[in-house]
Image (tube, helix red, strand yellow):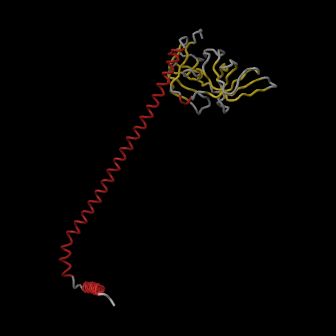
Amino acid sequence: MLSTTARHTAVLVFCFVAFAGTLIVLDNHHRLDAAKTPLETLVRPFAAGLSTAGDDLRGLSHRNQSDLAKQLQAVTAERDQLLAENARLQQLQGEVEQLRKQLDFKEAHPGLTPLSANIIGHDPGGAHQILVLDRGSDDGIQKGMAVISPDFYVGQVSEVTPDRARVILAIDASAHAGAMVQRSKAAGVLDGRWQAGGYFQLDHLKASDDVVVGDVVVTSAGTARVPEGLVVGKVAQVDREVQADTVTAQVTPLIDYSTLRAVTVILGTGNGQ
């Protein structure tokens, strides 16, 4: 048998269902219209208030999103500006460092007459490896003068105008210069091999010359207007032809020509050249 509490609960549920059913029937027959109007009048302000509050919340959300978007755009623009400024400062730092090294070179080689020049053009993808300088014959530059940066051999001046100079890089196939192994003084001719897929080749070495992988190669006194002792590169491979009694060395440059921003032109070597 059901307990007293369970019976009371069942009676309440039955009454609620019956009451709800009665209201539905009365509403379907429009018997509640007179009572609904005052209730709607009473509830309408609260509903309108809730609707207005919802609109305000949505508007506030949209404004917040718009403000956040503007802030994000401003932060992004500031970040891009800082990145650009940092890149410019890094470039200036590189130029200052190269100029400082040129000054050190001038102080270490008082017998030479150096002239600083900025690189204003190059043609890394062309048929020849060239640089264009912002100095020319008005500054004393002549064809054939050596170009360095500052202890490294860069190339030689190939063309000159009053305010411009064109430089053929040492790695170009048209470039040739006297060179030697710094350690053993074994001398030969340095040929550019950029167009052939390499950089340098040291030819005309004797079979008895002492040259091994890792040796540093520098300029010799065999090329007019090119000072002796400028660093060219490092030996990467040695090829010995026993029957031909010759030795050829493949040389990798120790300077990245693409990073150059300024160079030094040797106007005089102190020996009348």
Determine whether 129 is above or below 1 in the image: above
Report the quarter where the N terminus lies: bottom left
How many badges with numbers are in the image?
Answer: 0
Report the quarter where the C terminus lies: top right
Residue 55 location in percent, x, y? Answer: 27, 62
99 or 214, which is in the foreground? 214
Q: In this image, 204 relative to 155: left or right? A: right
Residue 89 location in percent, x, y? Answer: 43, 31
Q: Residue furthest right?
A: 243
Dividing the picture into quadrants, the one containing residue 224 is: top right
111 or 140, which is in the foreground? 111
Q: In this image, 117 relative to 2: left or right? A: right
Q: Which residue is drawn at 31% across and 53% down?
A: 64
Residue 24 shows up from this direction: no
Q: Which residue lies furthest to the bottom in this view?
A: 1
Dividing the picture into quadrants, the one containing residue 249 is: top right
Residue 146 location in percent, x, y? Answer: 58, 18
Q: In this image, 2 relative to 143: left or right? A: left
Q: Which residue is drawn at 43% across and 34% down?
A: 86
Determine whether 8 is above or below 73 in the image: below
Q: Which residue lies furthest to the top in this view?
A: 272
Q: Which residue is drawn at 74% across and 28% down?
A: 239
Residue 128 shows up from this direction: yes
Q: In this image, 5 relative to 79: left or right? A: left
Dividing the picture into quadrants, the one containing residue 18 is: bottom left
55 or 16, which is in the foreground? 16
Residue 87 location in percent, x, y? Answer: 45, 34
